[in-house]
Image (cartoon, helix red, strand yellow):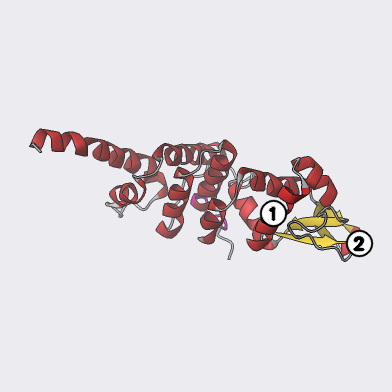
Amino acid sequence: MNNGSGKELLRPLAELTESVRKLIAPFSDAVLKELGEYVAGKIRFINFRNSLKVLEQAKRLLDELGIRPNPIELKILVPILEGAGLEDNDDLIEMWSGLLASAAGNCKVLPSFAHILTQLSPIEAKILDYIHTRRQEIECEGGNLGVDKQQLEKAIGLNSEEYGILVLNLRRLELIFQVTTDDMMWQPGHGDWGAGGHIGLTALGESLIDACKGPPRGTEGDVLKYVK
């Protein structure tokens, strides 16, 4: 192979590296001179357009709040960009953007959040958002916040078998809890999951959804303190 051909092959990677460096600069420490090359090397084989979109949306969200991005630890930053690059659903890309903005705004973002988000389907994200936005105090359960299980199933629009499998996965990830008003427990192929009761977010689920929505409104011009 001649030198000219080699340069042509290397040019796209060089351009990618430069694009990474420019977009990622507000979220990284200036002393990490090789960060652009490092991130490009980690994620150049996936759809990087989605990662760029997440960077742009996160920066725009922070600009709207008047928050200057703080450096993000690599163990949080790189998994977010890698996970976002594999995502093609707009709703989930928006969640990735919110997660990145929260990390840059010093909100509570655990390294595990990116890993959990990669395991969510769009419909599971819809379930979590439904619970988060419509939860209310359940008087019969000591003040727990949740939604009616049957109303949730109806709102999602899936049959009990499909719905139950999604719920089991969300329980596996420790993102939701469920309370039934009888002894019936749903299992695939056995009975109807639509037993009475309610379903709510665990502390982990609540923290994840909060982080994926970006820094809270009302913090314009200020940087949030990390919550231990």
Determine the secondary structure under disc 1: helix
Quarter of the figure with the N terminus? top left
Residue 140: image tag: 2
* Main secondary structure found in the magenta portion: loop
Q: Position of residue 143 (x, y in %)?
A: 85, 61
The correct choice, above or below, for 218 with respect to 139 in the image is above
Would you identify the image quadrant in which residue 116 lies?
bottom right
Q: Which residues are magenta?
A: 104-108
Q: Position of residue 189 (x, y in %)?
A: 75, 56
Would you identify the image quadrant in which residue 158 lies?
top right
* Residue under label 1: 165
Give the crowd class for mark 2: few <14, some 14-19, many >=20 residues within 10 Å.
few
Q: Residue at x 64, y 57 (%)?
A: 207
Query: Is residue 193 inside the magenta stretch?
Result: no
Query: Is residue 107 inside the magenta stretch?
Result: yes
Q: Position of residue 223 (x, y in %)?
A: 54, 50
Q: Callout 2, which amino acid?
A: Cys
